[in-house]
Image: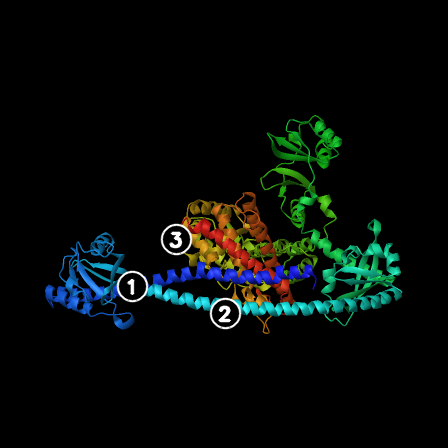
Amino acid sequence: MTKKNLRNFFLSIILPGILAIVFFIISIYTIIIPSFEKNMMDSKKEMIRELTNTAWSLIEEDNKRYQDSIITLEQAKKLAAKKIGKLRYGDNSKDYFWITDMHPTMVMHPYRNDLNGTDLSEYKDPHNKKLFVEAVNLVKKQDKGYIHYMWQWKDDSTKIVPKLSYVKGFSDWGWIIGTGIYLEDVKGEIISLQRRLLKISFLIAFVIFIILLFIIRQSLNIEKRRNHAEKKLKLSRQKYQALVEASTDGTLMIIDNKIIFSNKKFNKMLNCSSINLLEYKFNDLFEINWNDVLLLFDDPEKSVSIDTKLLRKKKEKKEVVISISKIKYAEQDGFIVVTKDITKQKQIEKATENLSQELQTSLLLMNQPIKHLIKSFIKCDLNTTAFEAASLMLRKKQNIIFVSQEKNIIGLINDSDLRKRIIAKGLDANTGVSNIMTSPVKYIRDNLLIYEAILMFDSENISHLAVKDNLDNFIGIISYEDVLNLQKNTLSFLVRKIEKAEKLESIKQIQKKVTVLIKALLDSGAKAQNITRIISSIADAITNRLILLSLEEFGEPPCRFAFVAMGSEGRKEQTLATDQDNAIIIEDVEKGKLENAKKYFKNFAEKMNNDLDYVGYKYCEGEVMANNPKWMQPLSVWKNYFTKWIVNSTPQNLIDSSIFFDFRCIYGEKKYTDELKLHIDKVIENKAVFFYNFAESVLNFKAPSNISGSIIKTAAPKEISFDIKKILLPVLAFIKIYSLKNNIAETNSLSRLEKLFTQDIIKNPMYDELVFSYDFLMLLRLRFQILSIFKNEQPSNIIVVNKLTDIEKTTLKKIFSELSVLQSKLSFDFKNIA
């Protein structure tokens, strides 16, 4: 072994071992022994306190007999003193109790008879401490406590040692009873412990020393083997280099993701010399990632073929097929990579695959935010003439212009308006824009998706939509023409079919297609938020259509109402295993009219829930449905419900009522849900106990043991599963609590979270961690539901741990650790204010 290697070995192996021994011994004497001393003393103090309480109870028994007139007071005192004088405990049963009165005068001392009946007010220990006077003062002040003093060793009057006693007063008789421990005993036990720990320390140090000797010996042997391996490596290198050079295809050899040599054919394909190639790694030469390649080697005896692209100079890419074989090179894994030009047949197959991906991509595009399609806009004042507006549109090359008044957008004019309302009617070009503009302006939020914009274009029959941001400012426009080319969206087609459906069977068949649509979205890499919003949009469309069909059957309702979704549908977070959570808010009407209304809506709700179950949305097991009379009530009753849940909250009733705080109007009078939200905001203000109890549901959450423990690290032989919905609940509850606290009207969890982030209530990195956790858990949930459906099984929220990848298991562990961060924040923000 060279001097340099010897020095490195000493610094990396021997020195840490020595330091470990030193730190271990230091920790014993600076941490462990002091800790044991404290714990031992606390234990002794606890013991004499409990023993004194026991003796004190004997006095109380005799006092009770006196109070019951069974014996006289004098008899009771003598009897109690006699009993306590005989009490012994400790080694050799020589530890005892003593009694004084509040003067102090010694009432009873079993070993110092000379003190019995003596005035102790001037009695001092060898350190001049008036211990009995101090005991009286302590009892007068706090009825009980500990005192330190010097006293004779048990029944040996010649030996004086430190003692700690616990005293307690018996106020009815004016007595003080006490007992103590000799600190010499504790000191002896500690010395005995120190000796044992010292022996253990030397034993451990000896074991580590033996291990170090073994390591040194093994290291020397390894160094010898390394020198031998270097010689073998040279021979092996020559053999494989000859193999690579002999290949008629472009060939190279890779060790540890580094190219060690290549043949002339490959150098020519890449237009690069062998020497320059040594500076490259696999990822520099091919489009596919080397780590992804390694995952393909399930069987090391078989080679792997992959279609990819060769990255040449000037950013050119060449379609190739690479065949990779695994070899053993100097006792480590090496790889031979053979590169071939891709054949015409392969190109055709590749084009077919690309076409399939393009179809999926077009579907994915429809689920992107409209932000990418927003264009800037021009505007003019309300006093502008049509001629001036048209000139501005021509100059700015825009076919639409907004009309503003005092910085507010109040209308718009497009090319069609100028033709139809000015030229066709023969009006003067100086006509004011107020006479020809379209008002009010139809707008859409910038965080909505492209498919939602398409639905709005169709429903409003307009060519342009203004766009507002979350601060309610107009920031641009999008046109129907811009999104027309993207209207290959399957969702639009399904929604239109739902709106035209006349029979339940037709709607049921459409609902079945949702699974195919969601699988395509998952395969396309869509975000969980987009997928759940699409599922919810289809559910909304189906619910609306069923309501209209029911209204046609039952006729005009006797009063106004709102059909409300709650829970996951209320949050626009439905999955493929979601049941019904709905209710009806009835207009507040007079009692006679209300009874008639309830009869109507009872039949209406029964049909609605039955129809929803038939088309694919199963009944709610907790009966949170519109056909339940409890959840079909006037607005005033709903307000009372929420007031009761908030004002008289308990952790359990908040768990039961949590889904109601996610309500959203599906059909009817949206003003009822808006009014109900305003009522909640008002009642919830300054209700610290409500948030305290709500936070309990998250604080009490514990990760399932079968995924938070060793199962994550190693796959179990048996199938282990867990309910992912229960894992999502604390994340959703955390977001909901802060949204309610800050009067955020949004119901969607990520929309709520974005508002909290915008208002600087939830900050990074917590915001990013919550978004990631939500997306990961929801995608995992959807993936397993899709798998169940394609196996002809009922979709559920059950995740099979054994079917997760190691990365997914590790990610779950990371999410669980982040949940503890959420719990800490909740505890700090809400538990301390209740």
Mark 3 to mark 1 CA distance (whole Å): 56 Å
650 vs 461, nearest the viewer: 650
Quadrant of residue 309 within the rendered picture: bottom right
764 vs 498, nearest the viewer: 764
Q: Earlier in the sequence, mark 2 or mark 1?
A: 1
Number of the label disc, if any, that sits on residue 182: 1
- Left or right of 370? Residue 93 is left
Number of the label disc, if any, that sits on residue 665: none
Query: Which amino acid type is marked by label 1?
Result: Tyr
Query: Which amino acid type is marked by label 3?
Result: Asn
Mark 2 to mark 1 CA distance (whole Å): 33 Å
Of marks 3 and 2, the one in the foreground: 2
Mark 3 to mark 2 CA distance (whole Å): 63 Å
439 vs 155, nearest the viewer: 155
Where is residue 438? Give x, y as percent: 65, 36
Secondary structure category for the residue under label 1: strand
Residue for badge 2:
203
The answer to whether the residue labelled 3 contacts the one labelled 1, judged by CB atoms less than 8 Å apart, is no
Where is residue 240? Give x, y as percent: 83, 67
- Left or right of 370? Residue 318 is right
Query: Which amino acid type is marked by label 2?
Result: Leu
Quadrant of residue 707 within the rendered picture: bottom right
